[in-house]
Amino acid sequence: MTSPYTSPHTSPFPDFLQIQELLTEEQRLVQSTVRDFVAKEVEPKIRTAYLEERFPTEIIPKLGALGLLGSNLKGYGLPGMDHISYGLVMQELERCDSGIRSFASVQGALVMFPIHAFGSEAQKQEWLPKLGSGQAVGCFGLTEANGGSDPGAMQTRAEDKGDHWELNGSKMWITNGNLADVAVVWAATTDGIRGFVVPTKTPGFTARKMEGKLSLRASVTSELYFDHLKLPKDAVLPLSHGLKSPLSCLTQARYGIAWGVLGAAEACFDEAVAYASDRVTFKRPIGHTQLVQRKLAIMLSRLTQGKLLALRLGQLKNAGQLHFAHVSMGKQNNVEMALETARTCRDILGGNGIMIEYKAMRHMCNLETVFTYEGTNDIHLLIVGAEIAGKQAFGA
């Protein structure tokens, strides 16, 4: 009897429940195209980039040329992919490294999306084509050192000076900060929280790269400082009002994460299966032992469940029926699954698992950050819990 599991030695898509058959031909083409691109252009560079704590900036225009930046947005020369195709893009980028997906996720979901959703026509015309092509890089300034899971406590202020805005404050844990040509910055005003389009060459803007990370090393993370930064009156995103606006951006990014981490988990799983088939101890491959087979079976089951969850989120998003709590369920479940998968695969690899030649520990370290950022694991559980109980359990 032939196993329904397609070995990673013979197919790039191990697919126990044949989920690929639920995708359209176009969606499968998107996935295979991005996987081929990543294998050729990014995988050969990622180990060195990770060790050197740098993002491989040479791939940015290539990401743009393939339409992988803001790929589910329409107009302004953007691809307008369906949301499942977009999810598959995130999955294939994170199959390489979470830092690569983070770059594209921030660029598309946290910079281009708010400009697309809340910006003026002039802001859209100026920035969306450049960001989509990779000619410009953006960052998203929401999180502050003392804010964390409570973004409503932000201390960054934008004051209306009559003929201009003055921005003062700081942001922390900002992906792409030192690479960015433009920042979408969220600040408190007398009219509530508003978003601002801030070119990074504006006097009073400073970005400081955060060094010494043990996770997401192939991603640029920065602190941003605004010191009496003067902005024109039309720098504000006119349709942004209140905390709901930046949170809607996070919902877009979290959706991409729910898909992206599937790639990291699958990369670790494929590596562990291949290793267990080849590593002989006590005169037989370790993949023939009960302990290892049990681990592989549990991982495949949970990875398959995660794929089905992401696919359903994509269907709901395509239908305009996706709720932010749905996304929280997907982000929490799939990141936790991916992190546990990476840890288990590292264990199967034994001592080799700590070496850079193997993927599992790099993914494991990256996923420790993904487990925390854009809503911690606990916060997402509480978001879903509030839907169940009808009462929010955190905050005032």
Image (tube, rainbow, N blue to C red):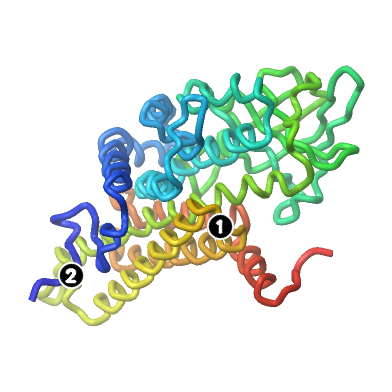
> Where residue 291 appears, x then y in whole percent?
27, 80
- Please indicate whether residue 170 sits to the left or right of residue 48 in the image: right
Residues tagged 2 and 1 counted as in contact (Cβ below 8 A): no
Amino acid at the residue labelled 1: Leu
Q: Foreground residue, 113 or 44?
A: 113
Amino acid at the residue labelled 2: Pro
Classify 5 as above or below 178.
Answer: below
Q: Residues within 10 Å of mark 1 (few under 14, many from 20)?
A: some
Classify 337 as above or below 105.
Answer: below
Residue drawn at (85%, 20%) of the image: 164
Q: Residues within 10 Å of mark 2 (few under 14, many from 20)?
A: few
Classify 290 as above or below 205.
Answer: below
> Where residue 171 appears, x then y in whole percent?
71, 39
- Please indicate whether residue 321 sits to the left or right of residue 100 in the image: right
Classify 55 as above or below 265.
Answer: above
Residue drawn at (29%, 68%) of the image: 348
- Please indicate whether residue 53 sits to the left or right of residue 229 in the image: left
Q: Which mark is residue 4?
A: 2
Q: Earlier in the sequence, mark 2 or mark 1?
A: 2
- Pick the quarter of the image with the N terminus: bottom left
Closer mark to the observer between disc 2 and disc 1: 1
Q: Is any part of residue 220 visible from this angle? A: no
The kind of secondary structure element at disc 1 is loop
> Where residue 267 appears, x then y in whole percent?
31, 55
The kind of secondary structure element at disc 2 is loop
Residue drawn at (25%, 39%) of the image: 36
| Residue identified by numbered label 1 | 322
Q: Which mark is residue 204?
A: none
For the residues marked 2 and 1, what is the alpha-carbon distance in whole angstroms? 32 Å
Q: Foreground residue, 278 or 79?
A: 79
Q: Foreground residue, 185 or 130?
A: 130
Q: How many marks?
A: 2
